[in-house]
Image (cartoon, rainbow, N blue to C red):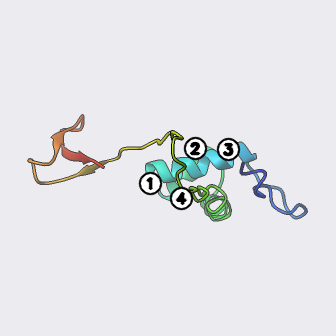
Amino acid sequence: AVRERGGNGPGGGRPWCLPLAERVLLVAVYYRTNLTMRQLAPPFGCSPATVCRVIKRLRPLLALEPVPRPVAGVERLWIVDGTLVPVRDRTVGASSRNYRFSANV
């Protein structure tokens, strides 16, 4: 989908140091782990500036398309991802593996 939306660019110019699949993975890891660009550069073998350029270029291409209005009688599949957020209130949080109280959001 990213390739069809122009993920490789218009052509010409300097080629990317990472293949498209690794660039998409880099953006996914960036959003999933919330690491800084300086932390993401060494595992992918590139500079922080390259990480910044990849994220800026592919961010809009990875955005979800608007969901059409629901049609009666058609089932939809929704995927929901949870993230643990640290909380101080022990009534809303549960102890996680790192022994901190957190809520699944």
Residue drawn at x 91%, y 62% is 12
Q: Who comes first in sequence, dot 2 or dot 1?
A: 1
Which amino acid lies under the numbered mark 2 shown in the image of this protein?
Answer: Pro
Q: Who comes first in sequence, dot 2 or dot 4?
A: 4
The answer to whether mark 1 and mark 3 are in CB contact below 8 A is no
Residue 34: mark: 1
Residue drawn at x 72%, y 51% is 2
Mark 4 packing: few (<14 Cα in 10 Å), some, or many (20+)? some
Distance between mark 3 and mark 4 Cα atoms: 15 Å
The answer to whether mark 2 and mark 3 are in CB contact below 8 A is no
Distance between mark 2 and mark 1 Cα atoms: 15 Å
Q: Nearer the viewer, mark 2 or mark 3?
A: 3
* Left-right relation of 69 to 87: right
Q: Which residue is mark 3?
A: 22
Q: Which residue is mark 2?
A: 43
Q: Which residue is mark 4?
A: 37
Residue drawn at x 63%, y 63% is 60
Mark 3 packing: few (<14 Cα in 10 Å), some, or many (20+)? few
Which amino acid lies under the numbered mark 4 shown in the image of this protein?
Answer: Met
Q: Nearer the viewer, mark 3 or mark 4?
A: 3
Q: Secondary structure at mark 1?
A: loop
Q: Who comes first in sequence, dot 1 or dot 3?
A: 3
Q: Position of residue 53 (x, y in %)?
A: 66, 64
Which amino acid lies under the numbered mark 3 shown in the image of this protein?
Answer: Glu
